């Protein structure tokens, strides 16, 4: 069994990918950042939010497979 998937958190990252998002997706991400800071006292940057989201989705895929939210969303259901 694999260890639980954890995002890398606050550390220097050596690997980089470029992800293109719509203006609306970028605004949603920025809104989430502000909500996390204003309502939950969490000062995190957008990269940290994305790494956390990726970790959650990949863990769900690993544990739920066909029933995972990623498979369902990619299939459009």
Image (cartoon, rainbow, N blue to C red):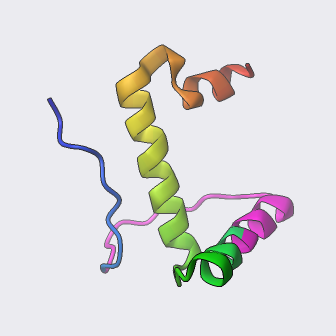
User: Over which residues does the magenta segment extend?
Assistant: 12-31
Say whether residue 17 is visible: no
Name the residue furthest right: 24
Residue 58 belongs to the span the image colors magenta: no
Give the left or right position of residue 75, taking residue 14 as reference: right
Say whether residue 38 is visible: yes
Percent coordinates x, y for residue 48 in the rendering = 48, 70
Give the left or right position of residue 43, taking residue 19 as reference: left
Percent coordinates x, y for residue 17 in the rendering = 49, 61
- Residue 75's image quarter? top right
Which residue is drawn at the image coordinates 45% and 46% (left, top)? 56
Name the residue furthest left: 1
Check the image and report above or below for 60 versus 67.
Answer: below
Check the image and report above or below for 68 versus 3.
Answer: above
Which residue is drawn at the image coordinates 58% and 29% (left, top)? 69
Disc tally is: 0
- Residue 77's image quarter? top right
Name the residue furthest top: 66
Which residue is drawn at the image coordinates 55% and 83% (left, top)? 41
Which residue is drawn at the image coordinates 49% and 41% (left, top)? 57
Percent coordinates x, y for residue 6 in the rendering = 31, 54
Where's the N terminus, which quadrant? top left
Percent coordinates x, y for residue 35 in the rendering = 69, 74
């Amino acid at each position: 069994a694999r260890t639980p998937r954890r995002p890398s958190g606050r550390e220097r990252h050596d690997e980089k990918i470029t992800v293109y998002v719509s203006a609306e997706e970028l605004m949603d991400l920025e809104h989430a950042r502000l909500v996390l800071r204003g309502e939950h006292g969490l000062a995190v940057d957008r990269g940290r939010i994305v790494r956390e989201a990726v970790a959650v989705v990949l863990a769900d895929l690993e544990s739920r497979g066909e029933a995972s939210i990623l498979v369902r969303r990619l299939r459009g259901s």
